Amino acid sequence: MSEIPKDEVLLEFPENYIAIVRINRPKNYNALNLNVRSLIAEKFNELKNREDIRAVIITGNEKSFAAGADLKEMSVLSAVDYYKAHVERLYNAFADYPRPVIAAVNGFALGGGMELAMISDIILAGQNAKFGQPEVKVGVMPGAGGSQRLVRAVGKYNAMRLCLTGMMIGANEAKEMGLVCEVLEDDKVMERAMEMARELSALPPLGLEHIKYAILHGPDMSLESALGLERKSMQVLLSSKDRTEATAAFLEKRTATYKGE
């Protein structure tokens, strides 16, 4: 049996408080086989236990963020094989990560790659990036959240158009839909992602976690319940040491230092 490569997803720590999860299958346009999905889950599970990491960037390379599922692997997987792989659990390790995640997208973000980007909290894209859910063209459908996260991000009609036709769209159209936050020159995407990660890592970690949780979970509640969630989160933050530090730093005209307490 051939050894399963462990370098198909890399975990990097370029600066204090920041981690990069990098998909590393350049010969396959970073196609997502089960090994890559497992490694992504492994990296995010590792990061969950690292209080010193406050912002994460997920990325690929200059040619592809992730060009969808590995069709060669899928062609030999039965329905039972796919079920037993429990891909949803692998994606959940990423989706449940409590701190901010930035997707830095160059090249293709298709199928599972676009689904992966949509799990992130902020999507930055190079001007030549391409997005799409082309699963229908190979006889299947989005299977890792594409039909559900996409409609929540861009609305019913845009989601229908992308999923039913399998078409690709460029970064500017994706931004107009509300899928992408910023479009940049291709060689500036990681630079901007690092700049944003630094901005986030300088903010109170508990505040960021509560904001992320409320935004992700509130829309699935009634408005009354969601507002209750918001109030409870606000009350927790009012009693945090970071809130006290923020107020003191503002009054003393100095930079605050946050400890996530």
Image (spheres, rainbow, N blue to C red):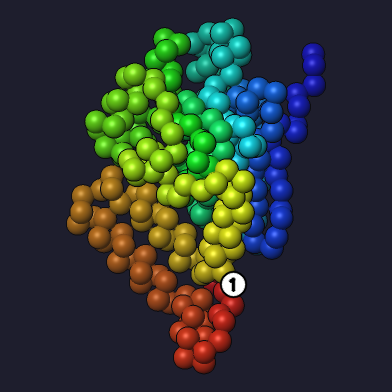
Q: Which one is nearer the viewer's eye here, 39 or 253? A: 253
Q: Residue at the location (34% across, 49% down)?
A: 217
* Quadrant of the frame with the N terminus: top right
Within 10 Å of disc 1 (Cα), the crowding (few <14, some 14-19, many 20+) is some
Q: Residue at the location (39% across, 15% down)?
A: 136
Q: Which one is nearer the viewer's eye here, 23 or 40? A: 23
Residue 196 screen position, x and y as percent: 54, 59
Q: Identify the residue at the far bottom of this view.
A: 252
* Quadrant of the frame with the C terminus: bottom right
Residue 167 screen position, x and y as percent: 39, 22
Residue 203 screen position, x and y as percent: 52, 69
Q: Is residue 200 left or right of residue 2?
A: left
> What is the three-letter code of the residue carrying label 1?
Lys
Q: Is residue 176 left or right of residue 56?
A: left
Q: Is residue 49 above or below residue 3?
A: below
Q: Which one is nearer the viewer's eye here, 13 or 244? A: 13
Q: Is residue 220 visible?
A: yes
Residue at disc 1, secondary structure: loop
> Which residue has dot 1 on it?
259
Total numbered circles: 1
Q: Is residue 57 above or below residue 129?
A: below
Q: Residue at the location (42% across, 61% down)?
A: 210
Residue 74, quarter of picture:
top right
